[in-house]
Image (tube, rainbow, N blue to C red):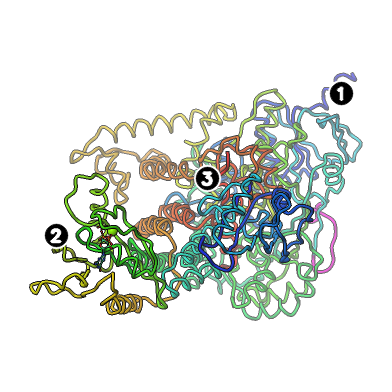
Amino acid sequence: MTLLKTHKNHWDVIVVGGGHAGIEAALASARLGVKTLLLTLHLDLIGQMSCNPSVGGIGKGHIVREIDAMGGAMGLLADQSALQLRILNTRKGAAVQAIRAQCDRHRYRTLARQLLDGHNSLFLRQGEVISLERQGDFLSALHLSDGSRLTFSTLVLTSGTFLNGHLHIGLSSTSGGRGGERASLSLSEFLREKCGLSLGRLKTGTPPRLKGRTIDFSRMEPQQGDTPTPFFSQLAPLPPSLFFDGPPLPCHLTHTTEQTRDVIQKNLDRSPLYSGKIHGIGPRYCPSIEDKVVKFPDHLTHHVFIEPEGLGIDEYYPNGISTSLPVDVQELILSSIPGLEKSMILRPGYAVEYDFVFPDQLRHTLSVKSLPNLFLAGQINGTTGYEEAAGQGLVAGINAARFSQGQPPWTPDRQSSYIGVMVDDLVTHSIDEPYRMFTSRAENRLYIRNDNAVDRLSPQASALGLLSEPQRSYMNSRFDFQNALRNTLHSSRRGGKSLYHLLRSPELSLRQLLQEERIDISSVPSLWIDSLEQEIKYEGYVRISLERWNRMENLPIPPSLFDQPIPGLSNEIRTRLRKSRPATLHEALSLRGMTPGAIDLLRIFLTKEPASPS
Amino acid sequence: MEPIVAPVTALVPQPVGILRLSGDNLWPKISPLFPGHPCPSPRKATLLSPTLNGLPLDTVLLLFFPSPHSLTGEDVIEIHCHGNPQNIRFLLSLIELQGIRPAKPGEFSLRSYKNGKLSLLKAESLHRMISAPTYSEFLSAHTSFSQPNRHPLYALKEQFVDLLSSFYAFLDYPEDLDSDRDSHPHHILLSQIHSLQTFSRHQISLFKKNQRAFSSFSILLAGPPNSGKSSLFNRILQSDRALVSPFPGTTRDLLEGRLSLPFGDLLILDSAGFRSSDDIIEGMGIAKARKTISQVDLLLWVNSPESPTTLPFHTKTKTLTIWNKADLSPPPPSSSPDFIVSARTRKGLRSLLSTLTSLTKNFYSNQQSTDPLLDSERQAKALSSFLKSLNLAEQALNSGTFDLALSSLEHGRHLLEDGIGLISTEEIYDRVFSRFCLGK
Ligand SMILES: Nc1nc2c(ncn2[C@@H]2O[C@H](COP(=O)(O)OP(=O)(O)OP(=O)(O)O)[C@@H](O)[C@H]2O)c(=O)[nH]1
Ligand SMILES: [Mg+2]
């Protein structure tokens, strides 16, 4: 009896946190057939979108496609709960396009729960972790506030903004994660005191949520979704339409006014941001409205996007005016915005401050360097955004499961995925402000496109065992189709040149060519056509940019360099170099704390003749 | 680093000569020359006597600049001694005996550079400053040196970081920026690229215009052997630089002398006499002289009564003919030399010199700009390859492939870095967020 009970409470992988990182981590682990428990503070809030109800966008949408190509959840959930979907950057070239979905956040949650429920090796549990047991370099068990003790082989922490979270509305503050949920203070202490990890503090914020009936949409510019609807999913036949009948729901665009600016300037002293109450560092790229007004005083207006939160739910998210000013000021701000003058607040905006772990204490597997069976993913690593969190969840989940089975780690590659770029950035550079994915961060941008995530990642996912049988066969039929078409394009000629060759010219489109050649593709998913077309068009450029990259950054660093003193390098940097012994200039470049001057010195040392005495 | 030493003043008789030393832990290494004396206090002139076997050798002023607050970032010691060349040589040899090796040319600057005391741009400005033939070029180089942000490549870099940050903003924030307030991105980006192209082309052409074999106004003395070229060379420089002898074929290699005139330097070159010669070395000297004729600003063709010849080939270089040894015999009536002189009696030299002076003055009066310029071939090269990637980016943008344009620019960033050092990514992101109000 006792034996059985012990067994029942032992888990190969326990994932703490039911946010977007937690979902992907738990699912990845379960898909690998490992006995997994997802532990969360509130079972009904799994997959909560606590910021705006939207998934994807530039950089982020790329990550969603990659998660999807690895058999993950986020793309599916977003597609099936989407109120509208759009492709962004349509005029800037295929390499930088991405999809953005506006989601019904209630439906998203429900679907997430259903997806988790559907796995045999995945279990859910509501509970609050109050302490952890450590044995040497390993964590072994955790205790819940309800008195239970759970043991595990590996632990994945995805506790989001809940580490020592503090909510600020005006000058009043309460402890809590987000949207009134509880915060975990003890976990933060444990990581700092018992695990010796160094923690920092960040902040983020939301705008007030508004009641739709009190918004005058007629004074705003509607933003429609694309038709035909683009979807994220790539490993399953696409849904025939959005989940509801009728046209996609529009978003609406309005803007702040000079009056908004005046209101904010007059009340700055009541903002916890500017009165010095908040110490955490906020992201520059997700500024509160008070930040925007202070930093850009001569911008008379700022965009505000009114986003629907769900179908049949009269709640709207005014994206662009996140604030931690007191509620009465929030009301004044709203009344200064065209179309929102009479709007009523359903939930006030707030700022949240939380602890995070400096991610350079992690390996590329997202396990803690000093505690190999502890994995961290999501906002706990200092990132923002559901997509960034989910991408890390996937990596941590895969590796936690593999670690529990004694298998070697799997790490995503910087040259072939945004997830790889992100993980590499985090663990090598660490962060000093919340990390968000930008397409500008990816050196190999022309290759890691939105259209070819399946080519880049699905074969790996399949080899790892992450894909279900239907996903695998769908992937294979895509590859078969594309191989066949590729062969046809190579062998058919026109005017002495192969069709494949002709397609490299920007003017000619694959669809047009196939039509002229009378090849019927009406039954083929359009993504299959698009990705092959872009592959052909970008092939040459990708090669050139890779060669350039290799020439520039692969300057080898002879190991002897670390043993000789490099004049001009600070002791700190010298120690870092000696410790991590980078093999190339690029690796050195990505070390934390490398200053431009230091890189300069290294570059000179490596390219110029070594003027060092014998 | 290994300690080094070099005289920083010329080895000619003058009141003061200066020796400079640089390296780690310097004082203990040279203290045997100053027995019993404690390490001098930093940055204070200390009066000392180097001694050998108890015998005082000279009275010197010693300045000690401990690392890192020094020229090179290492310990630096400057010794101001009496400027007798023999004295300087002897002190040098004593210092070298302490295990301090002579510096290679440019080694002090190299160390300053490596120790972050001198940026690559500054090092090159410094070099141009030291070798500037005119005061205006000195000023131009000094402007870049003392105010690096006025260096043309710095200005270029600023514009380029702006351009990249615009690209990144438009790339990652299509929803925030694709509206009327920020007008159409392609338009803005193209005009930024155009202005960078114009600037780069302008700088490259300015550099090319200034790019000559000799940076100063240059004069070559050539003519048949034994006509007295070397004698004239010595007269013009007022020193016995060149070997003079009654035997034809005395001068073999090209000799260089410099006259510092108030408005700019005059570079004068002496060459081997022209004749067909079996001597290989002399033949090489003649070939060199021939080649040099096309590179100088003025050719002085020197004849004498022994074997007068005319210039054996055509040249575009401005040429003046000189009849030397007029004390022996006047030029034949058939010839009409521009100058009739005697290097021996100095007859006619004054008029020759005043013509050379006014030609020099004319030459420099056309180039009085003190605007900072590119400093080196290396910088010009980096800039031209950067310009190529700008052109590629322009093409890509015109054909609507924003992503390919950006990729060319990112390549250009590395090329530019070869000229000016690293452009940090952080710097670009800072620009993105300080120029654009981004994010919701
Ligand atoms: N009488 C007289 N002799 C001169 C004069 N100038 C030079 N000489 C002599 O001519 C000889 C040759 O002079 P250099 O100056 O060596 O002639 P050079 O043209 O340099 O000769 P190479 O280097 O051999 O081509 C020496 O013996 C000089 O003393 C002059 O004006 N009058
Ligand atoms: Mg001679």
Evaluate if marks 3 and 1 touch, with contact meaning CB atoms under 8 Å apart: no
Task: Give A277 or A152, whichever is nearer the viewer.
Answer: A277
In the image, which residues are magenta?
A169-181
* Residue A115 seen anywhere in this rendered image of the structure: no
Identify the subunit bearing mark 3. A
Where is residue A533 drawn, in percent x and y?
37, 43
Task: Give B326 or A491, whichever is nearer the viewer.
Answer: B326
In the rendered structure, find residue A5 and report the number of the disc placed on it.
Answer: 1
Crowding around mark 3 (Cα neighbors within 10 Å: few <14, some 14 to 19, many 20+) is many
Question: Circle 3 is placed at which residue position?
Answer: A232
Question: Circle 2 is placed at which residue position?
Answer: B312
Q: Which residue in the rendered view is the most extreme toward the front? A: B328
Q: Is residue B260 magenta?
A: no
Which quadrant would the N terminus of chain A be assigned to in this image?
top right
Q: Amino acid at mark 1?
A: Lys
Q: Do callouts 2 and 1 point to residues on the same chain?
A: no
Q: Amino acid at mark 3?
A: Phe
Residue in the image at 38% along x and 67% along y: B194
Decide: is B424 above or below A257.
above
